[in-house]
Amino acid sequence: MANGPQLTTQTLKVLGTLLNNRPDALSGADIGRATKLQSGTLYPLLLRLEQAGWVESYWESETPQELGRPRRRFYQLTALGARTAKAGIQDFASTIGELAWRRR
Amino acid sequence: MAQALVLALGGMLAAVLNRLSGGAIHEWIPWFTRRLLEIAAIRSPYDQRERLAEEWESHINEVSGDLGKIVFAYGCVSAAQEIALMRMRSAPGVEQQDQERQSVSKMQTPIQSGENPVMHGIPVALLSEDRNPLTNLQDRLRATSLGREVFSHVGLPTSGTDIIIRQLQESRAEVVIVDVRSQSVHRALHAIELIRSTTEIAIFASGDMTQPAHIVASMRSGASEYVDRSAGHEALLEALTRFSSLRTRALRAGKARVFTFLGAKGGVGCTTAAVNTALALQISHGDVVLVDFAHGHTALQLNLRPRFCVLDALRNLDRMDASLLDGYISKTTEGLHLLAGATQPEATEPTPGELARLLDFLVNHYRFVIIDASSRMDRTTKLLSDLSEAVLVVAQTDVLSLWCADRIQSFVEEGARRDRIRLVLNRYRKVLGFGDKDIERVTNCKVYWKIPNDFYAVAASIDRGSPIVLQKQSEVGRSYRGLAAKLSGSNLGWGFPTPATDEGPEGAGAAGIAVKKPRCPNLTSGSAALHPG
């Protein structure tokens, strides 16, 4: 935790979105839609989370030729990321109340 | 960034107009967004480029509306910038740096070995089908201090058009280490064959020494070394050292030339000489980098405001590649690259290994490396001098300056067997009864060049941030162009003509520089090294 990314509002939004959809993985576009984060914020954040080991990512299994479009890259929380996300959201909720975007 | 902003604003304007007109502008939008995404991809770190480009391309298809697409694409440019900055900021911690310094300092440096600077920091790519062996390879490579990781991937290429092959080529790796595992030996051998047939990268196989069949098969497939997986980093270091010595011999002919400028004492015009000579070389030959190991004054003279300095480059040597170096470099409109000097004092000096690795990286990317060490007299200066092809001591013809030049000569040449120090006499004025022979006798250095005195013109050019070499009619500017021509044209030994050929630069004409005879009458006599006709 000490060396991981800071738990900013944007980070919590992304972690919360991934947590809510666990175990399903989400593409960058899905996360962008859910969090309303712009690409300039979202992608550096996803890379930072991936570098910290909180999130892992993988390509769609089909090739672009089969899909007829560029492949999506999917993101999902690791066990460490899930623990961190739960702890972060709990801390946040205990301070200022439940997060509006969190699924009940 | 400005280019992207202009494009984005243009795109937004086009989108608005499109809404209003609904006409042909609609066709422009894809071009705008595609161009923005291309810029974003270019600005991304090379190892993330392919991934991000494909991911963004996929994402933008799901964004609705032309304006939305443009905003998204512009956001990607910002994202790329941010990701590149993240990479630069994530320098190793202080403790790790200390450990690295200690391990680097144990290496035999060019100075210790008494030889010319050899290859340090070989760019290495790592391929393995499993993450754990890959991590192990990364640790071993880091421990060697000789190789630097430029690309690593979990997975092996399966065909000649595999994206891994393309990424290997783009990473500019000189060595690729392929992990050969018992359970997937055929895939590893196939990958080695593919890499050998599609790239010119040297291949090392890393595997188990208890499997002779794997060793033989790997070597037959195209691996030049087979490294014991369980032998720690020493075996890898040995293999890289063998590769380094072979590569150094191959590259020797094509390496950049390194010239270090030293000031005999403060205020003699050393930085001015380095800046103007570098700029003259850039204009005549191109591919020049000026490295400021002094006080950061070069940036002022070139009217640049660098964000990073040479210390940033030294701190991030382990991850240095062309794109990262480009981030640290400031560029003039003439195309001269500047690795700016630190404006704040640094507590720790770079180690011989770090300096050697930085210089090695620069000589492989440029044609000329000009170092401004000014009047800095410390271990770094000595190291830089040892790593340079030639050291030009800038002095004036006053007693104090010449006395200091003699001291510098003793300091720099101490323990070295090379004769590579020459005098550049700045603000030259002839003193009756005290000729070149006397100067050479007093300083133990040969006079290489004389720059006429035009203090006010030079001072004004410094104040304006426009080096005097850019003034075509200036006597001093012409002199610097002549110095650059002589440096670039000489090809005898360490780059200095013998006294018999000292009359003029053979390469001056070839370099396309018009070096006229100086008009200043006091400069036209008494010097064999004076401006060539």
Image (spheres, helix red, strand yellow):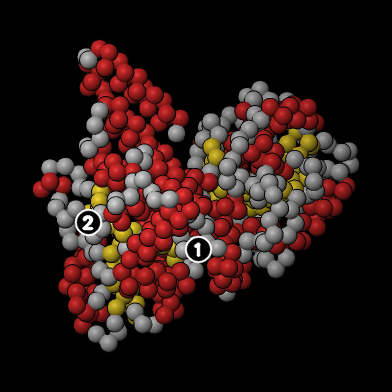
Q: Label 2 is found on which chain of the structure? A: A
Q: Which of B144 and B250 is in front in this view?
A: B144
**Residue B473: image x %, image y %?**
66, 22
Q: Residue A19 carries which label?
A: none
Q: Do labels 2 and 1 share a chain?
A: yes
Report the Cα–Cα distance between label 2 and label 1: 28 Å
Looking at the image, residue A96 sits to the left or right of residue B343; the answer is left
Q: In which quarter of the image is the C terminus of chain B?
A: top right
Residue B375 shows up from this direction: yes
Quadrant position of residue A70: top left
Q: In this view, does B375 lie to the left or right of B225?
A: right
Q: Is residue B155 positioned above or below A62 on the image?
A: below
Q: Which amino acid does label 2 sit on?
A: Asp
- For the point 43% across and 47% down, which residue is it? A9
- Residue under label 1, please give it: A2
Q: Position of residue A28 (x, y in %)?
A: 28, 46
Query: Which residue: 47% across, 72% down?
Result: B143
**In this figure, which residue is indicated by the disc labeled 2?**
A24
Q: Mark 1 is on which residue type? A: Ala
Residue B449 image position (x, y, % from top left): 70, 42
**In-front residue for pair B378/B17:** B17
